[in-house]
Amino acid sequence: MTTTSAREPLHQVSLVVNGVPRAAAVPARRLLSDFLRHDLGLTGTHVGCEHGVCGACTVLVDGRPMRSCLQFAVSAVGAEITTVEGCRAADGGLGPVQQAFQDCHGLQCGFCTPGFVTTITAYLEEQEQPSAEQAREAIAGNLCRCTGYQNIVAAVQRAAELRRPARPDADGAER
Amino acid sequence: MKPPPFTYHRAGEVEEALDLLAEAGADGKVLAGGQSLVPMLNMRLTAPATLVDINPLRDLAHVRVENGGGPARVRVGATARHTDVERDAAAFAVLPLLRQALEHVAHPTIRNRGTTVGSLVHADPAGEMTAVLALLDGSVELRSTGGTRVVTASDFFVGPLESCVRHDELATSAFFPVPEGLTGSAWLEVARRHGDYAVCGVGTLVTLDDDLRVSAVRASYVSVGATPVVLDLGDAVVGRSFDAADWPAAGRLAAGRLQPEGDIHATAAYRQHLAGVLTARALARAADAAVERTKP
């Protein structure tokens, strides 16, 4: 994060993160990713490349996945943000996408995982039963250097199963 | 990898944005989706003194099919995201080329924030929507405190990463005309990685007459020139039935007319070959799409 020059004017940024109203005064150039991590202490959002290529910093802005390193916090005034911390289950346990990553061994070092979890959480709202090909397309904008992606594709489909309320304990995920 | 300091203004109205841009002068810059601008700021490739944030201008978030008074066209406002254009059912019904090309613009996550008009102003020679605007003979509406002007695609793109937008102007809308007649379209491109910049990309329009003979053929290219290149390829195939047209001949005609440059991703010769092959395939696909339109 940039150190703030004493002369740099601050802007009051108020928004809702994971359902909780939050606010902080920050310089205009504060990236949303840094705002979440440093100003709000939500370090679940990871910062990789800082030019929109890796996808690790992906958060949901008004429900749509976006790169938090490619927008300014000051532009997000009034927005509803969901970070990986907001993708957990209502009881505080693992959310369906997180559970699916555990089930399918969809992560190794875990650095890229928050971006995958947010991206997949939004994707499954639109496509409830993706094919393996669709799952691959859905995660094409996120880079993982450990897994080789196979288990992440499996996790997308496993998460889709876990989300289906009629069959909450279904275990027939295509692997 | 952090942006340099700048003075930030949030425009609540179009007129306010125009005043702010006039005031900011040559060091001012419009912030729309920021999917090209913010990476450039993060890498400190650019350092505007003032940013005018137009994201609050929801009046300009429209994607509209306009039919009244003249040929049909799709109007896209300055704050409409790529995703808004891509998913618009009415726009897709009259102009499928928009969605066909947009599916190749980076990744969905980028398209959720990036704006179509912003990508036109950015004028990247690899930018799909620049080639789409050029192929359709579209235009861009530019407003400033001094007035409004509408610039056609052929005048709009000046050079690589350079459009004719003056520093006090805001691109408020882009107009994508709907081709007349029985016309089909297609977009094809080859990139090193999914969602990355195209090594070569081509958009095609094929128009058929009542007997399903080819009457007009046009193609537009990204990544083969400083600005979008549009070719009329009618000489190779006009007059032939859609299923007997020699599309590879049209591809060879196109390749012969293009003069791409080589770079780290591809040699000039490979890019030229690729343009020919992609052209032939995209023309065949566009012709099929035109025939599909005759079916109920």
Image: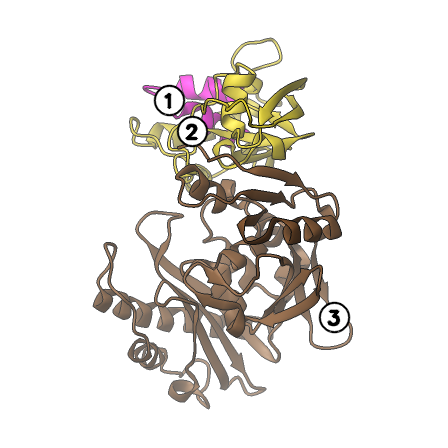
Chain colours: A yellow, B brown
At mark 3, the secondary structure is loop
The answer to which image quadrant residue B76 occupies is bottom right
- Residue wearing tag 1: A111
Evaluate if marks 2 and 1 touch, with contact meaning CB atoms under 8 Å apart.
Answer: yes
Horizontal and vertical percent position of residue B244:
40, 83
Are labels 3 and 1 assigned to the same chain? no
| Residue annotated with mark 3 | B67
**Residue receiving disc 2:** A56
Q: Is residue B294 left or right of residue B284?
A: right
Residue at position x 50%, y 23% in the image: A4
Comparing labels 2 and 3, the label whose residue is closer to the camera:
2
In this view of the protein, which residue sits in the foreground, A51 or A64?
A51
Q: Distance between the residues labelled 3 and 1?
A: 50 Å
How far from the left and from the top, in percent, is residue B66? 73, 67
Graded by Cα atoms within 10 Å as few (under 14), some (14 to 19) or many (20 or more), the crowding at tag 2 reads many
Where B32 falls versus B263 (above or below)?
A: above
- Residue at screen point 29% across, 79% down: B256
Q: Where is residue B165 in the image (x, y as percent from the top left)?
A: 56, 62
Number of disc labels? 3
B3 relative to B73, above or below: above
Residue nearer the viewer, A167 or A101:
A101
**Magenta-drawn segment:** A95-121
Amino acid carrying mark 2 in the image? Ala
- Per the model, the C-alpha gap separating discs 2 and 1 is 7 Å
Q: Distance between the residues labelled 2 and 3?
A: 43 Å
